[in-house]
Image (tube, grey):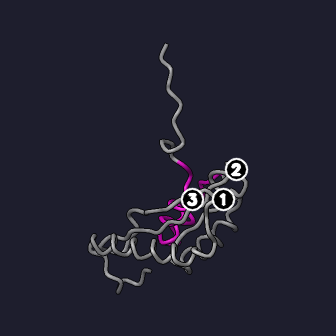
Amino acid sequence: MRYRRPLKKWQRREAVYITSLGKALLAWRDPKDIEERISRMDFEVTAPNTITSRTVLLSDLAATRARGYAEEIEESEAGVRCMAVPVFDHLGRPVAAMSIAFPLFRFDEAKQPEIAQTIRDLGLEASLSLGYSPDLGRP
């Protein structure tokens, strides 16, 4: 009999609606693609602030686009806050994302604007290295 070793947290795949990485990738997709993907979501609760509805997710994705980065505060794991940005290819499509995570007790709210700007700058740098042009109308 073979047993599977349980996956560590960092080895599991999480649903896009509960992680800043997933939301960063989803927020900049075509609206029809977003709707199609959301229609297949179960919105399973995994942490204290997990998004549990289509309406809340759509609102969060709109806020993500407006501020230029995704944020997640105890949506995938209790005690953890994450921020993420998409990385765009030469056609302006989100093809990857990068994030930073913090234990809530160590996050300094006063540094949030600086951290957000830093991760946006890094995402743009990565996107430019893939041939992305800011003229494509993305952040």
Residue count near mark 1 (Cα–Cα under 10 Å), binned few <14, some 14–19, many ≥20: few
Q: Which residue is mark 3?
A: 102
Which amino acid type is shown beneath numbered disc 3? Phe
Which of the two labelled residues, at mark 1 and mark 2, occupies the earlier sequence position?
A: 2
| 16 to 136, vertically: above or below | above
Tell me the residue at 62%/56% (across/down).
80
Label 1 and label 2: CA atoms lie apart by: 22 Å
Q: Label 1 sits on what residue type?
A: Phe
Q: Mark 1 or 2, which is nearer the eye?
A: 1
At a point 39% along the width and 72% down the height, the residue shown is: 122
Q: Main secondary structure of the magenta part?
A: helix
Q: Secondary structure at mark 2?
A: loop
Helix or strand or loop: what does disc 3 sit on? strand
Image quarter of the C terminus: bottom left
State the residue position of label 1. 105
* Residue 97 left/right relative to 72: left
10 Å crowding of disc 3: few (<14), some (14-19), many (20+): some
Q: Quadrant of residue 107?
A: bottom right
Earlier in the chain: of badge 3 and badge 2, it is: 2
